Image (cartoon, helix red, strand yellow):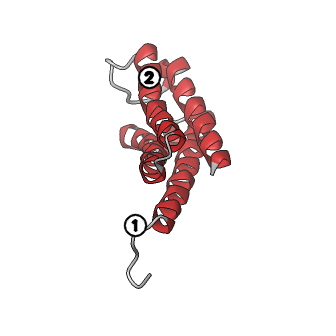
């Protein structure tokens, strides 16, 4: 699970950094969005991951897994770029950073969901 955490964190940082550094080239972004606001948004997202680590360190596995699942699911927000412009309107690098964040985030959220199931928090019908 720690490898997925690191992979997603790096993918998320890459995507947000690309957003921030090439903000003028991202199609359809609101004018109020700045380089600084993008980095602050990443710090907020990363903060959820840090809460997961803090809960795990405190010995609260259920809370840690819930924060971990939320942290991973935040990666799917990259898909919102496609509500502003078509995939073909983004550069290859943009699309790669979006999808790296989404896929690694969903994988992390899935692993956290499995952990929650094993901890008896999530129940599946018949299981």
| Residue drawn where x is 60% and y is 31% of the image | 14
The tag on residue 93 is: none
Residue 3 is situated, as x and y percent measured from the top left of the image, at 68, 46
* Residue 122 disc label: 1
- Single out the mark in the foreground, 1 or 2: 1
Q: Is residue 105 left or right of residue 120?
A: right
State whether residue 121 is above or below residue 62.
Answer: below
Asked if residue 65 is positioned above or below residue 75 in the image, the reply reads below
Q: Which residue is mark 2?
A: 38
Q: Judging from the image, what secondary structure is the residue with disc 2 in?
A: helix
Q: Residue at x 55, y 58 (%)?
A: 111
In the image, residue 62 sits, relative to residue 93, either above or below, namely below
Looking at the figure, which quarter contains the C terminus? bottom left
Percent position (x, y) of residue 109?
50, 54
Against 98, is 43 above or below?
Answer: above
Which image quadrant for residue 100?
A: top right
Q: Label 2: how many residues lie within 10 Å, few (<14), some (14-19) or many (20+)?
A: some
| Image location of residue 124, percent across then percent down | 40, 76
Horizontal side of 51 relative to 9 (left or right) equals: left
């Amino acid at each position: 699970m720690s490898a997925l955490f690191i992979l997603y964190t790096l993918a998320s940082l890459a995507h947000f950094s690309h957003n921030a550094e090439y903000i003028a080239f991202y199609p359809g972004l609101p004018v109020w969005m700045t380089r600084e606001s993008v980095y602050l948004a990443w710090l907020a997202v990363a903060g959820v991951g840090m809460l997961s680590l803090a809960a795990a360190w405190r010995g609260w596995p259920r809370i840690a897994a819930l924060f971990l699942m939320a942290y991973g699911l935040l990666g799917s927000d990259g898909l919102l770029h496609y509500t502003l412009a078509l995939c073909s309107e983004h550069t290859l690098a943009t699309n790669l950073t979006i999808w790296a964040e989404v896929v690694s985030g969903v994988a992390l959220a899935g692993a956290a969901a499995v952990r929650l199931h094993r901890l008896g928090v999530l129940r599946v019908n018949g299981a």
